[in-house]
Amino acid sequence: MNVKKLALLTIVILGALVLAACEAAGGTATPPRTSAPGENAGGDAELGTAPTLAEGSEEAVAAAVDHLSDELSTSSGGANVLSAQAVDWPDSSLGCPQPNESYLDVITPGYRIVIEIDGQHYEVHTDATGERIVLCDQGAAGAVDAAIAYLADQLGVSPGTITLLYAEEVQWPDTSLGCPEPGMGYAQVITPGFRVTLMAEGEEYEVHTDRTGDQVTMCRPIPDEVLDAAITYLADSLGIGADEITLLSSASSEWPDTSLGCPEPDQSYLQVITPGYKFTFEAGGEQYEIHTDEVGELIVLCPPPARE
């Protein structure tokens, strides 16, 4: 056997030995697998548990996890991100306004992030970059989830198609949660809860809840005839055309008497709960508040115009 043949045979034998050793060690080597979002590096995440993360949310999610971990004095390694939903918050409170705090009234893009730590779910709201972060009241988180489930059931849509716009803490005057129905009786006790504004199918909806989300209701839409009556009343009071008036906001209310929340001196009123509506209008650069009963027969400009 010449030298060339001997060298070739040696190479073949060595190659076979190396291949056998690799197979004995556990098979053909594969490149390392990068953990999917929501899995840990140990790869023990179950199939189907990857979270739903909005595109571009990675930076905000990482900041939210760090923020929550700091708040709870725990390791960020134990956090499991369940979802990150893109939201346009209506102002700089990021959907979690605090009492006695003021906020910039500007649309603020960001994310609603749900994180699980030690079996507890937490809702964290951020701006688009994660520079501004708030940990929402956990009672609000439960109430928001209940409000979304309620609206989804009412509309026959998936909860995942509903977006949270705002969740405001409210002290409802009774157990009607601010949405009294004619002919119904309610316990006259202050009922803490939330006014939750949601977006679904391009429309805004206002859902009212108690503190825990056990009681949920949605106020009846304001009748067009009541809105028209309020606009006509304001136009007549200001001596302008109805087309010069812009509606800024509207909400159901429950006035404590027939003054509709705007009592005038030396006037008497029936002391009965009077369901109705509160409208805010803009005209000529000024804002005006109109209160009505539920059918638009009683209407007042609040505060009333000065008498000459």
Image (spheres, rainbow, N blue to C red):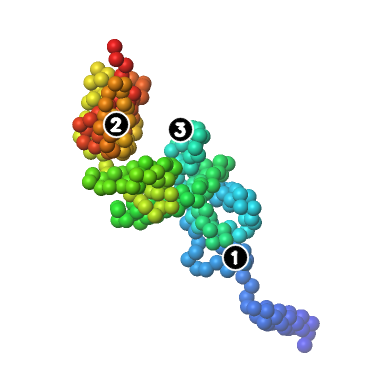
Circle 1 sits in a helix, a strand or a loop, which is it? loop
Tell me the crowding category of disc 1: few under 14, some 14 to 19, or many 20 or more residues within 10 angstroms, Cα based.
few
Q: State which tag comes first along the sequence, 1 or 2.
A: 1
Q: Nearer the viewer, residue 190 or 123?
A: 190
Instruction: Identify the residue at image location x=39%, y=55%.
Output: 214
The quarter in which the C terminus is drawn is: top left
Tell me the crowding category of disc 2: few under 14, some 14 to 19, or many 20 or more residues within 10 angstroms, Cα based.
many
- As drawn, which residue projects farthest toward the top? 308
Coordinates of residue 90 in the picture (x, y in percent): 43, 38
Q: Which residue is mark 3?
A: 105
- Please indicate, yes or no, whether residue 240 appears anywhere in the rendered image: no
Q: Amino acid at mark 3?
A: Asp
Instruction: Identify the residue at image location x=50%, y=39%.
Output: 98
Coordinates of residue 305 in the picture (x, y in percent): 31, 19
Circle 3 sits in a helix, a strand or a loop, which is it? loop
Pointers 2 and 3 in contact (C-beta within 8 Å): no
Pointers 3 and 1 in contact (C-beta within 8 Å): no
Coordinates of residue 184 in the picture (x, y in percent): 25, 47
The quarter in which the N terminus is drawn is: bottom right
Q: Amino acid at mark 2?
A: Leu
Q: Nearer the viewer, residue 138 or 173?
A: 173
Determine the CA span between mark 2 and mark 3.
28 Å
Q: State which tag comes first along the sequence, 2 or 3.
A: 3
Instruction: Identify the residue at image location x=30%, y=56%.
Output: 156
- As drawn, which residue projects farthest toward the right? 3
Q: Is residue 57 above or below residue 252?
A: below
Residue mark closest to the camera, 2 vs 3: 2
Q: Which residue is mark 2?
A: 260
Q: Which residue is mark 1?
A: 33
